[in-house]
Amino acid sequence: MRNLLLIAFLGISLPLFAQTTVGLVAYYPLDSMLTDNRGNTANVGTPFGNIGYGCGVDDLSLRLDGFNSEVIFLGPVNQEFDTEDISISFYFKTTATAGTQYLLSKRDSSCINENVFTIRYVPTSRTINCTFTENANKGVSFTEQMSPDACWQHLAIVRDDTKFRLYINGRFRREGGTLSRLDLENNGLLTLGNALCKGVSESSFEGLIDELRIYNRALDDDEVAGLFFAPDQIINRDTNIFLGSSVPISLTTTCAQEFTWSPSNDVDSPIEPEPVITPSKDGPTVYTVLMTDFASGCTAKDSIRLNVVDPDDLDCAVVYLPRAFTPNGDNLNDTYGVSNPFAVQEFISFEIFDRWGNRVFQTASPFDKWDGSFQGQEVNSGVMLYKVRHICRGEELLTTGSFTVLR
């Protein structure tokens, strides 16, 4: 018989970070208007060419057709491209299959290769190129590959003194710098989806762009992660469950219209976005979903690993309980109870006491959980005691121990 310390039920939450507004000088949601959501009416985008709107990571997003459609931003936001710290964040989803596309740029109309800022994307190789140039002898350039399993890609560039950091989908990917601060100041205007002085194989952007943010300071790793909404992903985490249990799937925001789950035999509706998975055998299985967005022709992919344990393989004499829990409302480890309820043959009682001996929780079900409160009030952080009475192979057993409430 195996003794396994298992979490019987699924924690279904991706960490949702607060989107910082400290130092946010311009925020363009791009969800039907091109104005600065921070209230600075001077920071306004002027559209050119054929632009429209489509499904976004949050509400709508800006659609550009790749034929010199663009948005040129007026106002003081252009003054942020000089020698000072800056952070730039946005999402994009291409509908093109070839060429080199300009996502964002700021350069002088004289087309000299000095004081230039550009971000370009190559769909065939799924590579992003970010260039910051003061002159021919002083500059920084990054080339990095984007995620092959994502449709929406989140990009963040952070300038911190003499260093430049690149983040893709909320994670740090590359850093570079110069001996002294780069001067990016020029007379050009910040341009979304296009650039002045394009090369022969270069073009304006074809696809969708969303959530453009510009800060007048260097964001740290956690702040950048907080700007990533994780679209087209499974919220549920890889976990252990018992045979006979079901897992209701939850997804983050998605623009997909077609969903395909595999393997499909344990999925109650393998063409629905959020089905219920009921594994039919023990052991680990990876379930994958393909999410196809017809508007962009892109398919995103994500997966979840469920490790299934047969309760008959567990020792009924042992009852497992965690050593701590955190009832802070983040949907992670928010309740406390028996971790292997399916292993219990006959359950009698589960009680929790504070350090003065007051009983704060009791139940006759191995599946009930304590939420960290007593008489409608949250208990303070500290050590608690528990008692579990149950019957295994005809013998009544008592399990006692302690755990810590962390807030």
Image: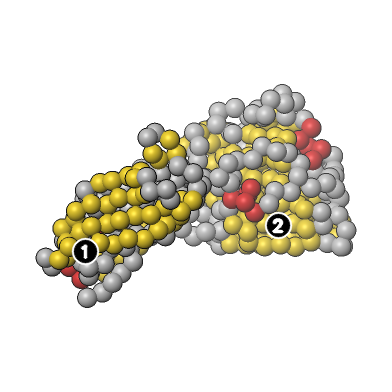
Residue type at mark 1? Answer: Leu
- Report helix, strand or loop for mark 2: strand
Where residue 214 appears, as percent x and y from the top left, is: 70, 40
Residue 329, placed above or below residue 97: above
In the displayed structure image, the side of residue 406 where residue 136 appears, left or right: right
Q: Between residues 127 and 180, which one lies in front from this camera angle?
A: 180
Q: Earlier in the sequence, mark 2 or mark 1?
A: 2
In the displayed structure image, the side of residue 105 where residue 341 appears, left or right: left
Q: Between residues 306 and 392, which one lies in front from this camera angle?
A: 392
In the displayed structure image, the side of residue 347 where residue 104 appears, left or right: right
In the displayed structure image, the side of residue 333 where residue 285 appears, left or right: left
* Disc sitting over residue 345 in the figure: none
C-alpha gap between disc 2 and disc 1: 58 Å
Where residue 155 appears, as percent x and y from the top left, is: 61, 50
Residue at position x 39%, y 33% in the image: 376
From this viewpoint, which residue is outermost toward the front?
356
CA neighbours of label 2 inside 10 A, class few (<14), some (14 to 19), many (20+):
many
Q: Which residue is mark 1?
A: 397
Between tags 2 and 1, which lies in front? Answer: 1
Note whether residue 278 is visible.
Answer: no
Q: Which residue is mark 2?
A: 165
Residue 80, placed above or below residue 341: above
- Report helix, strand or loop for mark 1: strand
